Amino acid sequence: MRKNITIAICLFSAAITCMAGNGGNSPVIEWKDSTTLAVRFDVRADDVRLGTNDRLVVMPRLVGADGNSRWLPFVEYAGKQNRKYFDRRAALQGEDRNEVKPVDGSLTYEYTVRAESWMRHTDLTLAIERDYEDCCCVTNLPGDTAAAPRYYWPGTSKVVPRISVAERLARTEHLLKPVADYRPVTTATPLRRIPGAQFVFFPISSTELKADYRRNRETLDRVVNILKTIEPDTASAVVYVNIVGSASPDGPAKQNNRLAEGRAKALCDYIRACGVGLPDSAYRIATVGEAWADLRDAALSDSVPAGDELIRIIDGTDDPDRRELLMKRLNKGKTYDYLRRHVLAEQRHSGYVNIYYSARPDEPALAINRAVDLIAEGRYAEALAEVEKWNDPRKWNTQGTALYRLGRKDDALRCFRLGAEAGDEEAARNYDMLNN
């Protein structure tokens, strides 16, 4: 019997090598998707000399470099009496009988393994072990091994939401603000304290807007260019152009109020004439009349002579013309002289404009990023539901990752391919790694 064992060892080892080198399949293990491994190898025992009471057991086992392992179903090659014995024992004891081949039979072993978590984090080897059993003892025979490619877990990253034209401009153009910031201007509002307010100037006692007067050209071009740049954008829109007319407090109040109204209208007409396609409802035209709120704000400065007394006059005098008279008499005219030279010159000739916009969020990008978070939490079906409804090429890599982790490899590959065609480098890498 010892001689037969030696022959069986040599011949069976040669048989496996021979099949791999003459059209047979070498032992293979490969990832089919995120949930399953396929195991395949060819074995035959036609050169092994087994007696009627002998058997050869082929036992595959997945082994991880981290020390974990898992046995797979084994296959028997058995002599006639041996096969009868174990068949009868299995029937009596209610055991499952593994596949048994006749001594001269051949087999392509194929088995799909449900992946365990440890398998995804280590190098795997398929160890094909064999035992030769005769009537009296069990002898371990040489086996074979095959290495699997390390598990590839396709990755996905968050995308940067697209920013609308208005949002981009608002980063540097401070007269441009979200519509949520809009507040109507009142006579109590110091215009010069409104962040980003842009002023245009009018000649004294005039409502004629001249583009070449002072720095008006620069301001007007800036306003019109912003409006025209936002106009074609589909992700943002101008909601309000807020235009406020004002006049300085010196002179009759009734006349100053007319000047303020005329200046606001002139500024609105200028913008419309430049071809800005906004509806009439977008123009919010207002007037503060005489700019007492700005004058009061200036009086808070320590540099205004008798500033505290000026504030008391402004707050305690209802009639604007009498208020002006008291202001001119204050401090023997020194306060008014200071205001005329340093403050009123800016108030006397100014109108004011601000722009308010709305912007739609980049919903596809937000959905993709929510899906990335869900994938990280293992909630693959929810991640898929987040992205599959959007017609946006940025979704393909995330959708493919969710599909792959749900075990739908073919669908995942299609998504990765579409993402690669759209220029997504991560999708291209996932496709290449999983398609080879």
Image (spheres, rainbow, N blue to C red):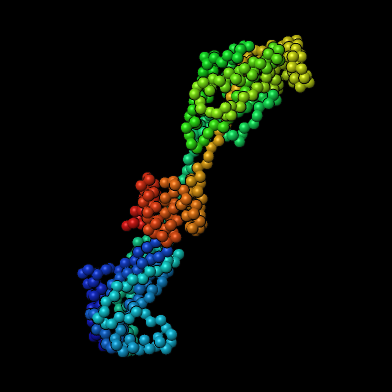
Front residue (pair 428, 221): 221
**Residue ranking furthest to the top:** 332
The percent position of residue 423, horizontal first and vertical second, equals 37, 45
Give left or right: position of 268 versus 313: left
| Quadrant showing the N terminus | bottom left
Q: Is residue 362 visible?
A: yes
Quadrant housing residue 215:
top right
Residue at coordinates 33% horizontally, 86% vertically from top-left?
83
The residue sitting at 69% across, 12% down in the picture is 251
Question: Could you say where residue 196 lies in the image, as x and y percent from the top left?
Answer: 58, 27
Q: Could you say which quadrant of the image residue 44 lies in? A: bottom left
Above or below, 284 relative to 320 = below
- Residue at figure coordinates x 58%, y 24% from the top left: 353
Which residue is at the front of the view, 317 or 336? Answer: 317
Residue sitting at the far front: 280
Viewport quadrant of the C terminus = bottom left
Left or right of 343 on screen, residue 57:
left
Q: In the rendered image of this protein, does residue 271 appear above or below residue 393? A: above
The answer to whether one can see residue 425 in this image is no
Q: Residue furthest right?
A: 316
In the figure, 427 relative to 198: above or below? Answer: below
